């Protein structure tokens, strides 16, 4: 298991696709945080509500990329032979999924935190003019942490969907329900995402352990 975790850490930090997805997530977060500010009146830009909107839209912008970060852990690997090598090196296919699940979930959650930091950075030039402004505040911190948790769960769901569908595009298409769950609000969204991630992982593990990976 440790070997699998080390291999996945090396892959996610040195290959182009994961880094490109995180970069795209941050760009989307910045763009949608700016949209949140543009939708408010000038007098309302320095309110904590503006920051809340920016955090929410930033999370929405980063969400598809968090899902894709998980999907690409397993989907689309068979033509390149990388999954065959991973299965041979592991004691079982479940270890392959477990190692990718741990690393991709943490990476997606960190991407969610970075998206929140981007939202704060985008709103800071306007809100910092208020002497009583708190850079994040307790409420903002709760939203940021909830968004990071949601991103992590999306990454976990993506791993399961990638294992289930085996190909990136079908796996991403199956990610529509987890993405839609974000609209339920912080508390309900996390519960729904946890349930959907568990379902995706259960189905994905079953499919992956039975699939013939030899090209």
Image (tube, grey):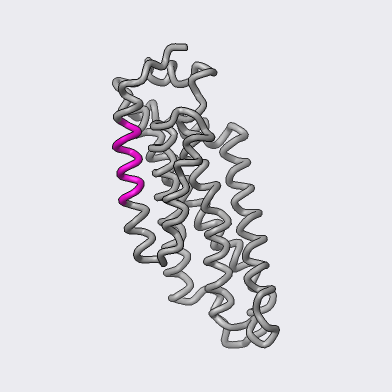
The one nearer the camera, 77 or 174, is 174
For the point 39% across and 27% down, the residue is 4
The one nearer the camera, 214 or 19, is 214
Q: What stretch is highlighted in magenta?
A: 195-205
Q: Is residue 99 left or right of residue 34?
A: left
The correct choice, above or below, for 54 with respect to 133 in the image is above
The correct choice, above or below, for 49 with respect to 149 in the image is below
For the point 59% across and 51% down, the residue is 25
- Number of numbered discs overlaid on the protein picture: 0
Membership of 144 in magenta stretch: no
Q: Is residue 135 left or right of residue 177?
A: right
Membership of 201 in magenta stretch: yes
Q: Where is residue 36 in the image (x, y as percent from the top left)?
A: 63, 71
For the point 50% across and 41% down, the residue is 173
For the point 45% across and 59% down, the residue is 182
State whether the magenta stretch is mostly helix, strand or loop. Answer: helix
The correct choice, above or below, for 17 with respect to 179 in the image is above
């Amino acid at each position: 298991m440790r070997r699998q975790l080390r291999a996945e850490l090396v892959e996610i930090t040195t290959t182009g696709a994961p880094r490109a997805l995180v970069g795209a997530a941050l760009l989307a977060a910045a763009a949608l945080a700016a949209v949140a500010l543009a939708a408010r009146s000038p007098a309302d830009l320095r309110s904590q509500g503006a920051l809340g909107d920016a955090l929410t839209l930033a999370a929405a912008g980063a969400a598809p990329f968090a899902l894709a970060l998980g999907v690409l852990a397993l989907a689309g690997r068979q033509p390149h032979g990388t999954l065959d090598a991973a299965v041979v090196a592991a004691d079982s296919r479940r270890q392959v999924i477990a190692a990718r699940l741990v690393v991709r979930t943490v990476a997606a959650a960190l991407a969610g935190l970075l998206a929140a930091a981007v939202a704060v950075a985008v709103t800071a030039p306007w809100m910092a003019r208020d002497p009583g402004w708190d850079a994040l505040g307790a409420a903002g911190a709760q939203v940021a942490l909830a968004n990071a948790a949601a991103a992590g769960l999306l990454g976990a769901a993506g791993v399961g969907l990638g294992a289930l569908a085996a190909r990136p595009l079908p796996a991403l298409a199956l990610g529509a329900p987890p993405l839609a769950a974000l609209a339920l609000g912080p508390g309900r969204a996390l519960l729904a995402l946890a349930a959907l991630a568990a379902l995706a992982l259960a189905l994905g593990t079953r499919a992956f352990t039975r699939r013939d990976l030899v090209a």
